[in-house]
Amino acid sequence: METDAAAIRASLTDGQAFLRVVEGHVEEISRYLRRRVSREIADELTADTFATAFARRESYDLARASALPWLYGIASNLLRNRVRHELRELELLARVAVDPLAQSADPLDLVLRTGFEPALARGLLGLSPEERDVLLLFAWGDLSYEEIAEALDLPIGTVRSRLSRARTHVRASLGAPVELKEASRG
Amino acid sequence: MDELQALKEFRDGIAGAPVGDPARERTMAAVRVLIERELADPPRPARRSARRRLLAVGLAAGVVTAALAVLPLRQSSPSLVGRALAAIGSGSVLHVVGEMPTGKQLLDLRTGATTPVVQQEEIWFDEDRGLRRDVTRIGGVIVDDTFQSQAGGWTPHGIVYDCTWIAAHPTEATKARVSCNPSGDNGTTPHVVPRPKPTLDPGLAGFADGYRSALASGAARDGGSGVLDGRAVDWLVFDTSEGPERVALDATTHKPILIDAPHRQQLRVTAIETTDSADGRFQRPAPDETPVLPSLGKSIDEQRLALDGAAIGAAAPAGVWAGSSVAGLPLASATVQRLVSSYYEHARPTQTGVGLQLDYGSLTADGRRDYTKPYVTVSEAPSPELAAAYMWGAIRGAPPAPGRLLYEPIPAASADSTALAVGFTVVGGRAVAIQASSNDLLLAAARALRLAG
């Protein structure tokens, strides 16, 4: 099976090859963005993410087989310009227990699924944008520490400390007990 | 349910863009347009490719670093390296202090003068021993402090979980609900996983040897001369996976003064040196140097008040308001709330108090704030700690002094109906958070705040 790196390498001489990278990851990237901001903005950012990736493909590290962390990194950077939209949706959810993103995806999702959503929204609101990126790439993007470091161009120690702090904060927002004395808020 | 599982289920019903989804087609179309443009105007081969090939040939032939260091990157490069080498000391530890913008401003509500709020980064780095200490301050207050070593990472609040620690302590890691496996299964058998050495931004790390290695290996290239903020500079360019990172070296002192990395805030380097006397820095951060902030703030037991200053003042003694209207938006709702602020691991006793929230603008049919129309919300607490329920934790750093508003202006391009401007100020000892649908409304509310009643 062709790796993303092989497709990107091929795209340096034949741009069409990059469409295979888009085909392979557009659903995942768009889902991540739609979970963070409204569908309208997310779909715009999805197109921007892959257009940016295409324009920057010469700088892609071909030693990395999967382009997914790189794409998540570009998407995260583009999201930074829309952070207010994300905060507004979270604030609405925290205050009135209605998730505008779920509403826009499917009216049936108006009924909150777990009951934790407003508390989670409060927890996410209390994080810095940088901490929120790390946490959601870990939880929603299923990226490893190393992949998050690669995606956000951060030292891995920073990823660890931000993730540790973000998880602790969100855990506290859920009212869950903390079980390990050495647990880090960092 | 732990926080990770809750997060995974949060908005889990939202789907991506499958085949046939208009967003997918739009994305494909956007890339196709770029492909066609490129076909019509092919990019010129990058010069660095040729140089890298040259370096690769040199390395294959066994040419040593000393020879590579004088490869003619451009005519002035050898002297550039020499001058940069002359700027550093002989110590093994790199010490850097820099500043980057936070995007926030401090506004003097009386004079209208604004001051940008910067975040200061201080780094101590010993590459050979694998040690790194990062201290981040805003307004002189430590907001982040991390020490990394080959033995692990620590913050003022304890260890930093990493895959090395988790592999070595699988049972404890499971109790702490941390894992490096997506399944969350750590097993019970300890394993040894090597811990990677801490690294440093190439534009800073390269200073340790005057950028000699970076230039020799091709990691950095000469980017020519220029002027930055009125100072003559020499530019170095590092090609990273995210794009070129540019480093400005002061043409007189030959020290880096700016790191301009892709998709990150520019770091203004205010001090950089090498030293041998930094062992005191390479230790676990002390908890008492970092402010202990509430980890959770809640507002509960909301009670509606009559919409006049006397009623508001009676229900919330010392409470402030912005009058019966702000910039034409009428006061639509006033409530008092019980505030509860709690601390991680009960580091401080839980605090309670009375908060006041005032909504200016329109309400929806069910009495909630109408976000689709212009609005201002003023939320206030008797102390910064109790204002945790009102996003006060987002300040990170020193709270604003009385008479000043800490806020992040909405860029003009983002000023649409969904805009959210947030500001913080202190009035009569009350910690006040203001949310508004525009910068103007935010400032109008901040300037109008006064004692209710």
Image: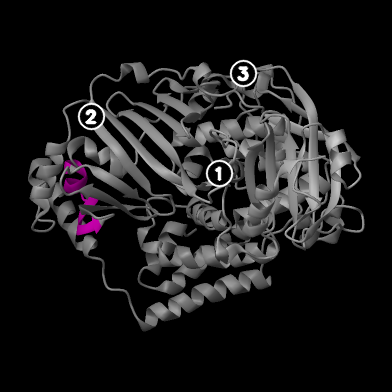
Quadrant for the C terminus of chain A in the image: top right
Q: Residue B71 appears at what percent x and percent y?
A: 10, 52
Dots 2, 3 in contact, CB < 8 A: no
Identify the disc placed on residue B274: 2
Colour approach in the figure: one colour
Q: Give how far apart the Cα atoms at labels 3 and 1 are.
A: 22 Å
Between B279 and A64, the one lying in front of the other is B279
Q: Chain of mark 1?
A: A
Q: Chain of mark 2?
A: B
What range is drawn magenta here? B212-227
Which secondary structure lies at badge 2? Answer: strand
Identify the disc placed on residue B172: 3
Q: Which residue is mark 1?
A: A143
Residue sitting at 53 percent across and 51 percent down?
B112
* Kind of residue sitting beneath label 1: Leu
Left or right placement of residue B296 versus residue A130 in this view: right
Q: Give how far apart the Cα atoms at labels 2 and 1 are.
A: 36 Å
Which secondary structure lies at badge 1? Answer: loop
